Image (cartoon, helix red, strand yellow):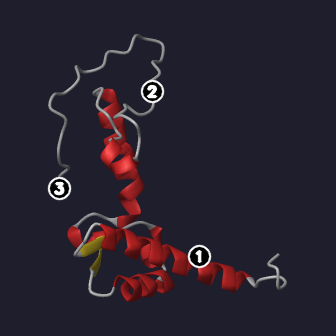
């Protein structure tokens, strides 16, 4: 309950939506972004997308679908990349992006009945991901 009484559910949702848009816009401005690419379930929220367009101002807003990267598959792609990095002994975090103290391999791989044989660590680490449609 707020100090002035209960807050309607729709007001809470509107406030969180606006906060999300402003947070994204502030982050984009802090790195002098010229374009934001939105992805995930939020792109199907017309109120959020309208708030993003408004708060981003002159910063272009696109959705990942327009670039051939289906927003609905974002989480699956992310876990595939993280799994690849872990299986190859490569860091999935870097301090410049996450604020972590040092780069680190994420997660663990637990073998089944037979010994697990992993590929040797790749060096250098991959620097980009390309997605091809078949």
Crowding around mark 1 (Cα neighbors within 10 Å: few <14, some 14 to 19, many 20+) is: few
Is residue 50 visible from the viewing direction of this image? yes
Residue lying at the far top in this picture: please name it.
115
According to the image, label 3 marks what residue? 132
Mark 3: secondary structure: loop
Residue 3, position in %: x, y? Answer: 82, 80
Q: CA distance from mark 3 to mark 2?
A: 28 Å
Crowding around mark 2 (Cα neighbors within 10 Å: few <14, some 14 to 19, many 20+) is: few
Between disc 1 and disc 2, whose residue precedes?
1
For image coordinates 34% across by 42% down, the residue present is: 95
Q: Is residue 48 left or right of residue 61?
A: right
According to the image, label 2 marks what residue? 108
Between disc 3 and disc 1, whose residue precedes?
1
Which is more toward the observer, 8 or 109? 8
According to the image, label 1 marks what residue? 16
Crowding around mark 3 (Cα neighbors within 10 Å: few <14, some 14 to 19, many 20+) is: few
Tag 3 and tag 1, C-beta contact below 8 Å: no
Query: Which of label 1 and label 2 is nearer to you?
Result: 1
In the image, residue 94 sits, relative to residue 67, either above or below, namely above
Q: Is residue 110 left or right of residue 117?
A: right
Residue lying at the far left in this picture: please name it.
124
Which is more toward the observer, 60 or 31? 31
Tag 1 and tag 2, C-beta contact below 8 Å: no
Name the mark on residue 54.
none
Q: CA distance from mark 3 to mark 1?
A: 35 Å
In the image, residue 104 sits, relative to residue 39, either above or below, namely above
Residue 47, position in %: x, y? Answer: 50, 86
Question: Which quadrant of the figure has residue 28?
Answer: bottom left
Mark 2: secondary structure: loop
Is residue 38 visible from the viewing direction of this image? no
Residue 69, position in %: x, y? Answer: 27, 63
């Amino acid at each position: 309950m707020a100090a002035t009484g209960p807050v309607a559910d729709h007001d809470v949702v509107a406030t969180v939506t606006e906060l999300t848009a402003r947070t994204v816009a502030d982050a984009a401005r802090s790195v002098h972004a010229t374009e934001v690419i939105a992805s995930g379930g939020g792109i199907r929220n017309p109120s959020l997308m309208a708030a993003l367009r408004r708060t981003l101002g002159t910063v272009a807003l696109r959705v990942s679908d327009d670039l051939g990267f289906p927003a609905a598959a974002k989480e699956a792609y992310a876990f595939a990349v993280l799994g690849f990095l872990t299986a190859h002994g490569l860091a999935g975090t870097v301090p410049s992006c996450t604020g972590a103290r040092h780069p680190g391999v994420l997660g663990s791989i637990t073998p089944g009945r037979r010994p697990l044989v992993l590929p040797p660590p790749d060096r250098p680490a991959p620097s980009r991901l390309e997605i091809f449609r078949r």
